[in-house]
Image: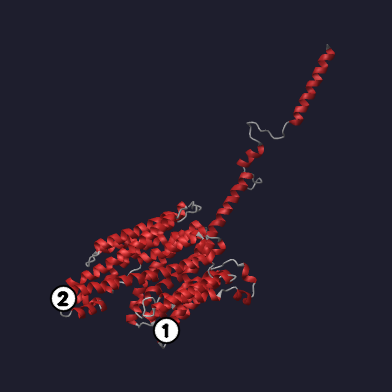
Amino acid sequence: MALAENEEYEASVVENELVDELAPLLSNGTEPALYKTISRRSDAGDLPPDDADLELAKQKQEQVRTADSTSGVYATISVLLLGVFVSQTDQSLVLTANASWIISAYILAQCVAQPLYGKLSDIYGRKACLQTSYFLFTVGAAGTGLGQTMGQVIAARAIQGCGAAGMTAMVSIIVTDLVPLHEVATLRSYINVLQTTGRSCGGVIGGALTQALGSRWAFLVQVPPSIVAMLLVQWRLHMPSKHSSNLSIAEKVKRVDFAGAIFPCATIFSKYAWGSNVITVMGLVFAIMFVAFIVSAKLATEPIFPLRMMGQYPVWTNYLLCALQVLVQSQPKPKPAAAGAYLIPAFMGNTVGGLISGYWIKYTGRYKWPTVVAPFLSIITMILCYTTWNGHTDLLAALAVLPGGMAAGMMSSSSFVGLAAGVSEEDMAVAGSGLYLFFNLGAIAGSSAGSAVYQTTLKSGLQEAVKDLPEGQTIMQRALESITYVQNASEQIRERIVPAFVNSFHRVNLLEMSFAVLCLFVARISQQTGLKRSQG
């Protein structure tokens, strides 16, 4: 019996020793480990950090790095906005000079150079192309102000137009390189505010300088801020090097599709002659140059504008949206007496619409809603103008264009984001510069179409209104040539001819409404790609 008890005791001791050997060194029980307890009671420097401390420190470092990076990016972009303001000031500044050839040379050169900047920035770099655009704009402004002959002035304006083509387009392209896509819409709205402010200030500045110092100073005044913009960009803008930076100058030149640049040039030039007596010849030139451009784009190794991009759904839909929205806005230029009646509400609406669209896209990650709402607002504007603008435009009637201005601002932000979301990174620069080209072409086509409808309807309306008057033909000619004559005419004559002007304007409203409906259809079928939402 004693032997059995002794064996049982020894077995128990062995089992306890085995349990002690297998037990963990640190307890997982309810009592806290000494390490954990001390780390919570001691100063941070007394003990090595645990995993939670390391993770918290890592998050703080990332937040600081992100904040520094974001502040640096926004500081860089704020520097770029000066050039945007200067280039857009010129758009309305030259209207005061009132020289059609000077204006035409600028617009033509701008349209020709617009598609080049995207591809050239891929080859030579964003900063080099932006600085080149500033340099051309500055030289052109100085040449226009100092030119001694009309030929010199026209040539200088063409150079300035080539520079202006890149001053806004390159900034938008650079923005897409520097910030996430959901932030692009907000920054685009800021760019749009600067564009609108520049256009609204340009006429005032140009008029004051022309009256006080002469028309040359309307151009020379642009030189100092352009130089300042160049210096700020050189100091602040730092872009990563492209893979083509190792190529020689000759190899880079070989990559430029010069034929593809020449053929669109002739195509765009022919658009301006459609209302002339040689319309058949210019139409033939347009067709030949268009075919030549297609052929050159297929044969070139790196075309200025790859044709495959027009087969991409986001590209052609957003190009159409931009062109159609500008078509809706474009109408015969207002006379000075009517300009103030609706330009200010339109500019205000443009600013508000751009900001609303930008922040909506930033915080929701969705850009199709502003794209669809914009044509609706344009249609509302056309209806309001049709019903309220009857020859006596008061303050309430002037506000009718406010929704139209909002539509333009909203479409400017949403269409650019839609394009950027739908194309690959390597195509963004080319696609972005093409978008600005369609902005310009839409403005040209809309202004031409609206003016054609307005002038044709007005002439026939005036003929009908004064056909029974002895001096009816003279009255009609003077009314067509000068709005001042209409304002100072007798009450009897005004009662006859003013309805003809109102009817012509309403015809333009109907034309613009048809463009807005088409724009709404394209917006409805456009695609939506989910974007990352801002957490701020």
The residue indicated by pointer 1 is: 153
Q: Are marks 1 and 2 in contact (CB under 8 Å)?
A: no
> Can residue 89 be spotted in the picture?
yes
- The three-letter amino acid code for the residue at tag 2 is Asp
Front residue of 15 and 431: 431
> Could you say whether the residue bearing mark 1 is in a helix, strand or loop?
helix
| In-image side of 226 versus 330 (left or right) | right
Whether residue 356 is visible, yes or no, is: no
Question: In percent of the image, x 50 and y 75: which residue is there?
Answer: 263
Give the x, y percent position of residue 246. 65, 71
Please state if 535 lies on the left or on the right of 460 as rendered: right
Q: Image height check: is 29 above or below 499?
A: above
Task: Decide which of 402, 307 is in the foreground and name it.
Answer: 307
Q: Nearer the viewer, mark 1 or mark 2?
A: 2
The residue depicted at 41 percent of the width and 74 percent of the height is 271
Residue name at image x 24 percent, y 62 percent: 388
In the rendered structure, the answer to whether residue 383 lies left or right of residue 219 reads: left
Q: Secondary structure at mark 2?
A: loop
The amino acid beneath tag 1 is Val
Residue 76: image location, x then y, percent = 51, 66
- Quick one: which residue is furthest to the top in this view? 1
Residue 88: percent from left, percent from top: 41, 71
Of the numbered discs 1 and 2, the one sitting upstream in the chain is: 1
Q: Looking at the picture, how far across and down is residue 336, in whole percent?
A: 28, 74
Are there few (<14), some (14-19), or many (20+) residues within 10 Å of tag 1? Answer: many
Q: CA distance from mark 1 to mark 2?
A: 47 Å
Q: Which residue is mark 2?
A: 468
